[in-house]
Amino acid sequence: MNNLIVANWKSNKNTLEVEDFFKVFSPKVKEVSLKRTEVVISPSFPFIYKCNQLISQDELNVSLAAKNISPFTQGAYTGEVAASQISDLAQYVIIGHSERRNYFNEDEDLIKKKVSLANEVGLKVILCVQDENTTVYDGVDTVAYEPIGSIGTGRPDDPERVEEVLTKLHERYPNVRLLYGGSVDSNSIHNYTEIALVKGYLVGGASLDADSFLQLISVCDEKN
Ligand code: PGA
């Protein structure tokens, strides 16, 4: 399985800022000869279409991820975006991010429903977990271990702890690709390059700037 690096832009960037990102990103990402890494960008819903257009126009080898989907199918659910509405625009969906679990009270029932709806329309699921005990449902492609104290804090998790959690997850779910996320930047990423089970990264703050994200892509691609 390839490595995966995901830019989680959270609720950041407007149209102009998305365009500015790609102006810098597109020519440079083409120069990186990606050997084993799939690059994914996760913009907010209104910009998925725009990013899709920019990726085709610039002929980039980059995939897209939604950051959430509705727990319902298409229909009368004002304000929700159904999995089937984005499945022709994005390849992945991030489900169960701790910011959704905490600020929007997403529980396991809801997360399970979303995983199932994503599977129905062929969206690959990146499930976020905060520890080794969280259930990983059938149909999850990738799990991102994101300890809550490390998200957006500048305090990346100890590599020993990351290895311990990933080892336990791998024992329970041997076919799932494992990522680390939480204050990954051009310094902290080197803490994890020796951990064989780390197959990539979910990056928040350090993915907002194109050059900063490109640096992380290169490091990720060197990792076995
Ligand atoms: P961070 O966010 O890199 O800004 O810590 C990671 C995430 O929440 O996915």
Image (cartoon, grey):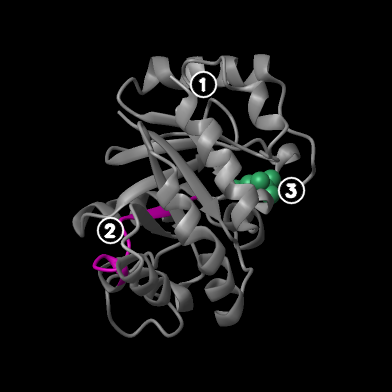
Q: From mark 1 to mark 3, how far is it between C-alphas?
A: 21 Å
Front position in the image: 112 or 43: 43
Query: Which one is earlier in the sequence, the residue at label 1 or at label 2?
Result: 2
Provide the residue designation for mark 1.
166
Label 1's element? helix
Q: Is residue 31 above or below residue 48?
A: above
Query: Which one is earlier in the sequence, the residue at label 2 or at label 3?
Result: 2
- As for residue 115 lying within the magenta part, the answer is no
- Report which quarter residue 110 is drawn in: bottom left
Q: From mark 2 to mark 3, how far is it between C-alphas?
A: 29 Å
Residue at 28% from the left image edge and 58% from the top image edge: 117
- Where residue 223 appears, x then y in whole percent? 48, 23
Residue stretch in magenta: 86-96
Label 2's element? helix
**Which label lies toward us, 1 or 3?**
3
Provide the residue designation for mark 3.
152
Provide the residue designation for mark 2.
117
Query: Which one is earlier in the sequence, the residue at label 1 or at label 3?
Result: 3
The crowding category of the residue bearing disc 3, from other C-alpha atoms within 10 Å (few below 14, some 14 to 19, many at least 20), is some
Q: From mark 1 to mark 2, how far is it between C-alphas?
A: 26 Å
Front position in the image: 81 or 182: 182
Q: Amino acid at mark 2?
A: Leu
Image quadrant containing the N terminus:
top left
- Where residue 211 appears, x then y in whole percent? 62, 52
- Where residue 58 appears, x then y in whole percent? 36, 66
Residue at 72% from the left image edge and 21% from the top image edge: 158
**Which label lies toward us, 1 or 2?**
1
**Which label lies toward us, 2 or 3?**
3
- Where residue 115 appears, x then y in whole percent? 34, 51
Label 3's element? loop
Residue at 61% from the left image edge and 74% from the top image edge: 17
